[in-house]
Image (cartoon, rainbow, N blue to C red):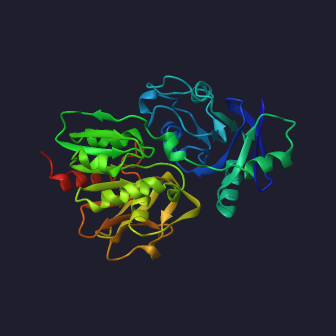
Amino acid sequence: MKAYLILEDNTVFEGESIGSTRDAVTEIVFNTSMTGYLEILTDPSYARQGIVMTYPLIGNYGVNEADVESLKPWADCFIVHELAPFASNFRNEMSLNEFLLKNDIPGIQGIDTRALTKILREKGTMNGVLTTNSEYDIDFEIKRAKANKTIDVVKMVSTKTITTLNHDGNYSVALLDYGAKSNIANSLVNRGCKVTIYPCETSAEEILASNPDGIMLSNGPGDPKDCGIIIENVKKLYESDTPIFAICLGHQLLGLATGADTFKLKYGHRGANHPAKDLITGRSYITSQNHGYVVDDKTINPDVAKVTFSNCNDGSVEGLTYNNKKIFTVQFHPEASPGPQDTGYLFDRFIDMMGGQQ
């Protein structure tokens, strides 16, 4: 069956339908990772987005559901040049196409993903419609794409219940779930922490009343400025003396809570090969990233925080350390799996802030 990707700038790509045949109206973004497509599909930060994979062959090692980053996939649609017709891996449980069908995710293959990526790089990320309707009305579809809005996306992906992992852990960590990848909690549990996962709008008073040794602010989707209630709670957490480690959206929210501003990048940073420089040591790391917004370095109050990581490609802020506080944040994903694990030591730094290994 044919499928059509219609961008709001009037560009149309024709290819072959994969996965579900339902329509998707969403923001189209690209990811430069060569592997990790299952983790990408199940990363809640991709909620309300359609993902273009720039690597030309996707799906060759199949799917193992032990590797998922959340309870379900969140991507609206999946766009590849070629979907591997069969999987070759001893851990394979099902093909990627079977996974897309099982989870009602539509997709398209057989299009020039290089040309599509160049459009997104030159014009910026934009909305689009994926449809299998060969009789589509392009004016209607472009209107539908332009009308697409993303609202309340953090509440959509966040847990609705409080859950505790590893009750016998040495340190008690409160993890605020703004769309947390599973491996954030796993990285803490593997270091001997008791992790309690809270819904995104849990009050600061409730979090602090549990007397945690540390607080983790997770990654998540959408524009951080849409998270008004959450920002107010983060501000109260910042004013406590509890150690805090924040990743991605959590990093942006803490920036907003302390007076800095954020802005949307032209096409974002999404992939497993983004270089970030530690400005303290001078060492650069290959990092896994997935974000469309960054903290504006021109708005950071030097009396509040200093930039400790920067992006080697565009100089944008990749990390902050807060003055006279046991608080640090990063824009990239130190928990990423698979992907570069160079920055996993940041979880050890968080453990040290809480009192060190026991």
Of residues 297 and 160, which is closer to you in this image?
160
Of residues 292 and 284, which is closer to you in this image?
292
Quadrant, the C terminus: top left
- Which residue is at 45% across, 35% downward? 70
Q: Is residue 325 above or below residue 134?
A: below
How many marks the image carries: the answer is 0
Q: Is residue 163 visible?
A: yes
Query: In which quadrant of the rendered view does residue 229 lie?
Result: bottom left
Furthest residue in direction left, as rendered: 358
Q: Where residue 4 sits in the image (x, y, percent)?
A: 77, 40
- Which residue is at 41% across, 64% downward? 255
Query: In which quadrant of the rendered view does residue 279 lie?
Result: bottom left
Q: Is residue 6 above or below residue 91?
A: below
Q: Where residue 147 sits in the image (x, y, percent)?
A: 73, 51
- Which residue is at 70% across, 37% downward? 108
Q: Is residue 298 above or below residue 270?
A: below
Q: Is residue 201 left or right of residue 94?
A: left
- Which residue is at 38% across, 55% downward? 233
Q: Is residue 306 above or below residue 80?
A: below
Q: Is residue 261 left or right of residue 25?
A: left
Quadrant, the N terminus: top right
Q: Where residue 240 sits in the image (x, y, percent)?
A: 25, 59
Q: Is residue 125 left or right of residue 336?
A: right
Q: Where residue 321 sits in the image (x, y, percent)?
A: 31, 66
Of residues 335 and 36, which is closer to you in this image?
335
